[in-house]
Image (cartoon, grey):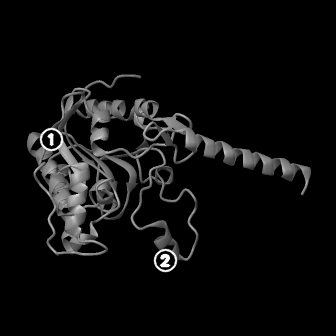
Amino acid sequence: MTLRDWFADRARSRQLVDSDRIRREMPDGLWTKCNHCSAPLYNKDLEANLQVCPKCGYHFRVSAWTRIGQLVDEGTFSQTHASIRSTDPLGFVDTKPYKVRLEESYDRLGDGDGVITGAADIEGTTIQLAVMDFAFMGGSMGSAVGEKITRTIEDAHEAHRPLIIVTASGGARMQEGTLSLMQMAKTSSALAQFAEGGGLYLAILADPTTGGVSASFATLADILISEPAAVIGFAGRRVIEQTIRQKAPPEFQTAEWLLKYGALDMIVPRSSLRPMLGQLLRMHAGQPATVA
């Protein structure tokens, strides 16, 4: 072993010891380790920074209710279609019954299913809003999710309001089979009618946006926005690599990759997302845009 190797080995050992000490000294519930740079982050500081790592800029996934709180004007959100819940039309069972999975998810996360819908104001403009929640069965799109999103599109059409949908999904909900796949056509058809009526649709593609959601309403917006480094695609990397028999680039299916090849309009950090939406809404309404 050379002297350089010896010093490198000692440095790695010290890092391991320091990491172990930090883990032992961090009380549960007070700190979070960044998934990207592994920095220990004080939860209150992380929350104040909109769940974005202040060290490396990594955007943590957030719940639908947290996202709503970050985007809309305080006190303006009014929930709609909250009574729509998933059922078990196929009596589906994998490692556990689908009915049990649903009950556990509702008990843990509330009645929103995979999406929370409603009306709200963003910097003074009233909009219809749908925000998907990846924590609810991977944000999968079952019949209830498809119905809530379709009704929200129809609400925006009838009220002549802009529509904003925040996506975060692993795709169609396999436990509902073809009924889940039908939601792709239903939501897309509703969006076509909304577009014919001149409605403005803004989509925010959060991490991850994949499967049937990315292949339907998520990518049919007038303006496609994403957060940095979000994974966006249809099939998974492994499936694609096996199909084409090639290794995909490291940045494949990231927001930055899609922006480079024209599949996104913009990447907006979370701290700038609400002001950017406000600007776009004012421009659509024919109001002057403010200069930051």
Kind of element beneath mark 1: strand
Residue situated in front as seen by the camera: 205 or 196:
205
Residue appearing at x 17%, y 75% in the figure = 91
Whole-percent x, y for residue 99 in the image: 19, 67
Asked if 181 appears above or below 117 in the picture, the reply is below
Whole-percent x, y for residue 48 in the image: 41, 29
Residue appearing at x 32%, y 53% in the figure = 135
Q: Outermost residue toward the right?
A: 2
Characterize the local packing of mark 1: few (<14), some (14-19) or many (20 or more) Cα atoms within 10 angstroms.
some
Look at mark 2 in the image and give the residue it sits on. Answer: 243
Look at mark 1 in the image and give the residue it sits on. Answer: 79
In-image side of 144 versus 258 (left or right): left
Mark 1 vs mark 2: give the one in front: 1
In-image side of 98 versus 83 (left or right): right
| Rendered image quadrant of residue 122 | top left
| Rendered image quadrant of residue 215 | bottom left
What is the number of the mark on residue 248? none
- Residue contact at pointers 1 and 2, CB within 8 angstroms: no
- The quarter of the image holding the N terminus is bottom right
Q: Would residue 126 be seen by someone viewing this image from the given angle?
A: yes
Kind of residue at badge 2: Thr
